[in-house]
Amino acid sequence: MKRLATIVLLLTTLTVYSAETTLPWAEFLHRQMQQMITTDQLPNAALAVVKDGEVVFLQGYGFRHLESQEPVDAHTLLRTGSVAKVFTWTAVMQLVEQGKLDLHADIQQYLDFQLPDFPRRYRNTHPTQSISLQHLMTHTAGFEDVLEGLFSFDPQPALRDYLTQHIPARIFPPGEVMAYSNYGTALAGYIVERVSGLPFEDYVEQHIFTPLGMNHSTFRQPLPQTLHGKAVTAYRMTDDEFLPAKFEHMPAPAGGLSTSAHDMARYMLALLGQDTVASLLQPETLQLMLSPAMSYHPLLGAMCLGFKQFRMNGQNIIFHGGSSNVFDSGLYLLPEQNLGIFMVYSGGNYTGHISILHNFLKTFFTAEPSVPLANLTAPASTPALQQLRGEYHQSRMLHTTPDKALNLMMGVMHIKPNEEGNLEVSHLGHTHRFRQVQPGIYQKLDPKPVYPFGPFEFLVAHQAPDGRLMLVTDGPLTYIRMPWFATSSFAALLLLPMVVLAIVSLLTFAVRGIFKAFSAPRPALPQQALLARALLIAHALCLIMMLWLLAATGQPDPVHILPATAFGETSFLTTLLGWMPYAITLLFAGLVYFAIVQWKQKWWSTFARTHYGLYTLFAVGLVWLFVFYNLVGV
């Protein structure tokens, strides 16, 4: 593979396709892209800028394939991740415009399978029980997250099969909690299929791509033969070497788009109502789709109908970001400036295009005056600073599947008041300081453009449907404070001592066995005592083996970042790992029995009996973890 020297070649040979323009905005974005490519060592990328009804800048960067060194141009296909969703929402709005779909009707009438019932605990307190298309489009349907089947290296099942095989639980009342949902978007794509009578891929081709002249775009996975040779190979730089990625399949409406800079420029012109060739939607429908439809507070960014929104430096930003495991992209519209920006690249991360957009806004637009906070209505929940202390999990959470433990690692926010009377907020690898500017409203003191859904300038206290404290900010996620027993610290408090006890126990028995071999024989222990000891040893061995299996099967792929299991790849080791919690739980039952018996029978010394009881006590906590995180009993 090409090594680090290839980067130099990339940057010295890659002015591939650029519209004639002297527009400073486009030149700035171009320089920012070049800088990101150099800094992050990206193998290929593309940029499109439209302004005042024209395509003012198209640029490809890098090579389609490092082996052939064929340069990326404006018609080269790259994958976009969740930017694909905006085409799903566009298709929905076309059918709404035609009177075939109702944004506020129960979506069950459009489906041929049954969604889960409304959560029982909310039936007496929350009257809205049915899910509407508007709920899907604002990510407020109330679904738990679904990770199984989201990515695969093999072709996805038919859309209906994917949806029926991975039906999520409903954990929030509709319309109340924004919780980003790939499943909800895939469900909307299936509704498009059902109502239009066309497979989703065909519908988008016939009603969006073809009218707009988007001839280098497709939702088909794998790519059709006619486009296969025009797509890039994604790479990631690892140990000074570009390693190639496999083609990642996703449920098409949620993330299956492959497209080009040229085609996205055509789409942005249509969204801005400036396409001179074809009309995507009627002006009033476009206005409805791109207007805020769900927001917790005037200070915060909102959800439009499928698009996200925030304000920064006096500009209204309508956007959607996207990530697979090897591609990242960002689509940004500034309607007041008749401006659209699309960026896509492989081998980087989601912060790249966000940082460029923030730098662009700060460079060309003046910061807005401070918001007159005193004139804003205080939020319903106004806790004291000390009450905010705790661990918060994002509302995009797993609830009923064995992946629930991932809640402890995905987007967790930790909050603690500091000595200056401010809040220290740890999130996404950064620590921010927030000050209270009004009861229940907290403003960031040190801006860092790392949040994917907006400036992350404010946190506002809110109340979750079950009464827990919830902090809201920009975008389609909220952060709900966890009870003590659902926090990462409590899980560690149960698991780590158990692991230490297991290791110490195994070492103790091993050393004892060695000394026993060289010492005088002792009176034989009863068979039950030997069985009790064997059970503890077996339990400890199973626990250590489970951790080893977890490490072995959870090793992230150097290119795709996630372990192979995230792509549906299984092996004997992954199957064995799935059975280990059950084996440990069965052995635990024997430990409890013998922990009681051995104390009565006094087979061992007081120290040994105390050790056995303490080990069993922590084994209780381990089984509780297995049950709470759905590793047994699912």
Image (cartoon, helix red, strand yellow):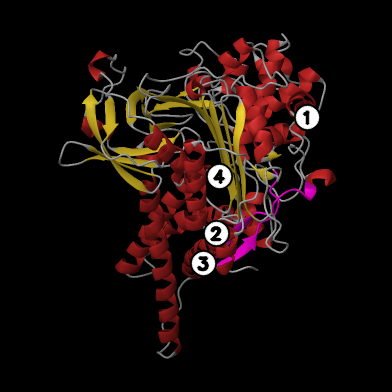
The label on residue 315 is none
**Residue shown at 47%/71% (left/top)?**
526
Q: Which-is-in-front pick, marks 2 and 1? A: 1
Query: In the rendered image of this protein, does residue 180 appear above or below residue 346?
Result: above
Q: Residue 207 at what x, y percent from top left?
A: 76, 23
Q: Residue 434 at what x, y percent from top left?
A: 26, 35
Snapshot quadrant of residue 212: top right
Magenta stretch encompasses residue 247: yes
Q: Specify start and end residues of the magenta stretch as a single range.
A: 228-249
Callout 2–callout 1 Cβ contact below 8 Å: no
- Which residue type carries mark 3? Leu
Snapshot quadrant of residue 472: top left
The label on residue 403 is 4
The label on residue 541 is 3
- Which residue type carries mark 1? Glu
Mark before the other along the chain sequence, 4 or 2:
4
**Residue toward you, 508 or 310:** 310
Task: Compute the Cα span from label 4 to label 2.
Answer: 13 Å
**Residue toward you, 615 or 333:** 333
Residue beneath disc 1: 205
- Which residue type carries mark 4? Asp
Task: Compute the Cα span from label 2 to label 3.
Answer: 14 Å
Q: Which-is-in-front pick, marks 4 and 3? A: 4
Q: Which-is-in-front pick, marks 1 and 3? A: 1
Element carrying mark 4:
helix
The quarter of the image holding the C terminus is: top right
